[in-house]
Image (tube, rainbow, N blue to C red):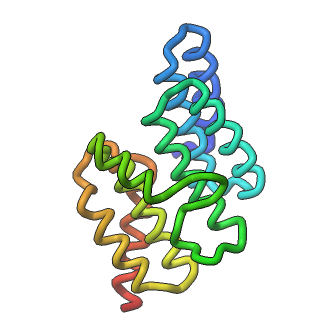
Amino acid sequence: KDSLRTSVAPLRQAYINGRETGDLLYATFAASFNGAIRLYSGENLQLLLESLTEDCLTIKGLKQELVYQISEVQRQYVINLQRPMKDPFVFDSDGFSEEAFFKKIKEIDDQATAFRIYNYKAALGCIFNDYKTAYANAIEAGRFEDETTSRQISYPSFLMFKSMAELKL
């Protein structure tokens, strides 16, 4: 019954603990989950984007590539919500290349991150009233929904945006 926000402070502490003990994977996942929880609990998007940008730079600097990819996709989603974009369904801001990203996650068979990017695109489709795009991306996300980490923080939004797109078509 506690708010999702109650996990923000412990995750920040988990990041600090991971850094102090040298467990960089643990630390960076804690930072990434911190951002995800803040996103799904309604954090101000401008403040969240500033924090996600800082976190992504830190995670990349710590050479945690998997966590960086996950975190950067989350940041790109927030960018597309926050800034006017030529195509709000493409994640190509601030030097990020969606094409290179898809190639990388395919190479390492990262199904959880594939789920996440398609889920974010489905959400954007609903937010921007492009339900055909939302539905197509929800179907793509659904290809990866059985990957266990896909069923974490973002899974309820996947179900909601998929249902919304289906109802609007």
**Front in this rendered view, residue 109 or 15:** 109
The residue drawn where x is 48% and y is 58% is 98
Percent of width and height locating residue 143: 24, 61
In the displayed structure, would residue 112 be above or below residue 155?
above
Looking at the image, how many numbered discs can be counted on the residues?
Answer: 0
**Front in this rendered view, residue 157 or 114:** 114
**Front in this rendered view, residue 82 or 93:** 93
Instruction: Using residue 78 as the reference point, say whether residue 136 is left or right of it.
Output: left
Which residue sits furthest top? 21
> Quadrant location of the C terminus?
bottom left
The residue drawn where x is 37% and y is 71% is 137
In the displayed structure, would residue 162 be above or below residue 98?
below
Percent of width and height locating residue 133: 42, 80
Percent of width and height locating residue 100: 44, 52
The residue drawn where x is 36% and y is 79% is 135
Q: Quadrant of residue 158?
A: bottom left
Percent of width and height locating residue 23: 49, 14
The residue drawn where x is 34% and y is 49% is 150
